[in-house]
Image (tube, rainbow, N blue to C red):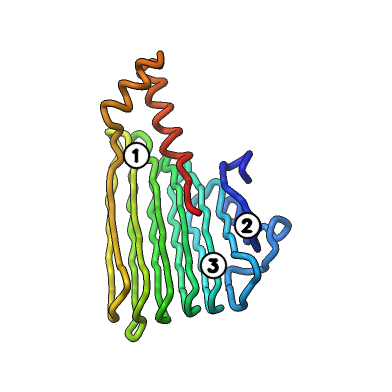
Amino acid sequence: MWDEFNIKTFPAETIVFRDGVFCPDLSTLESTNVDKKYDLPVHIIYIGEIAGKCRLEINISAENQSVYLSARIKNKKPAFLNIFIKNAGKNSEFRGHVMLENNDAINYECIAHHFMPNTTILVKTKLLAEKNTVSKISGTAIIDKNCDNTNSDISFTALADKTARIEFMPAQRISAIPTSAEHSASIYQPSPPQIQYLRMAGLSGAEVDTALRAAFMNDFSLF
């Protein structure tokens, strides 16, 4: 996974999707329903190229379980990706990092639903929007009634061509008192010192752009 898609792996129970299709030969678990406690964390890996409508459901009902998502995908045709996260496992945590490379038009929706108190759902999404692309990026955090002491954070960051169109749509539906509930959306812009440093290292303008894109895409720190 690291050599082909730059995805960090570690000792874990695995659930692997390639091009939106479940790969049982690369997985140790049979579904994204985490209904029992494992000695190892669960690592869901979603990689490759997508088109059309794609859906990923992650259901956590086991207590005290850590679940991670590493998604690194791109599209060359219009694509719609829904990720639904349901955490009903007390003291269980979900941490996700989604990297989207849009080469056409993409509609991405992440719904993070807390069904129990003392649950965590943290999702970091990064978008690389290429020339003349259209991106609609939405995220909704839902904290049900009596789900106190939850931790919720959905964040979006984009590196975009000047001709790209991006629409961020964050939302929260909170019916209990969380420990934390955050949302953020930002456009990444390299600082002048970063650009100057790369130019002083001998890189041309095109090479600077390539290096900054690579740094943005490969900053996949999740764990």
Q: CA distance from mark 3 to mark 2?
A: 17 Å
Q: Earlier in the sequence, mark 3 or mark 1?
A: 3
Q: Which mark is residue 121?
A: none
Q: Nearer the viewer, residue 133 or 72?
A: 72
Name the element at disc 2: strand
Q: Nearer the viewer, residue 183 or 165?
A: 183
Three-letter residue code for mark 2: Val
Name the element at disc 1: strand
Q: CA distance from mark 1 to mark 2?
A: 27 Å
Query: Would you say 101 lies left or right of 190 here?
Result: right
Residue at 37%, 21% in the rendered image: 198
Three-letter residue code for mark 1: Leu
Tell me whether the residue at label 3 lies in contact with that at label 2, contact meaning CB atoms closer than 8 angstroms. no
Residue at 40%, 76% in the rendered image: 114
Name the element at disc 3: strand
Q: Which mark is residue 66?
A: 3
Q: According to the image, label 1 marks what residue? A: 159
Q: Label 1: how many residues lie within 10 Å, few (<14), some (14-19) or many (20+)?
A: many
Three-letter residue code for mark 3: Ser
Q: According to the image, label 2 marks what residue? A: 16
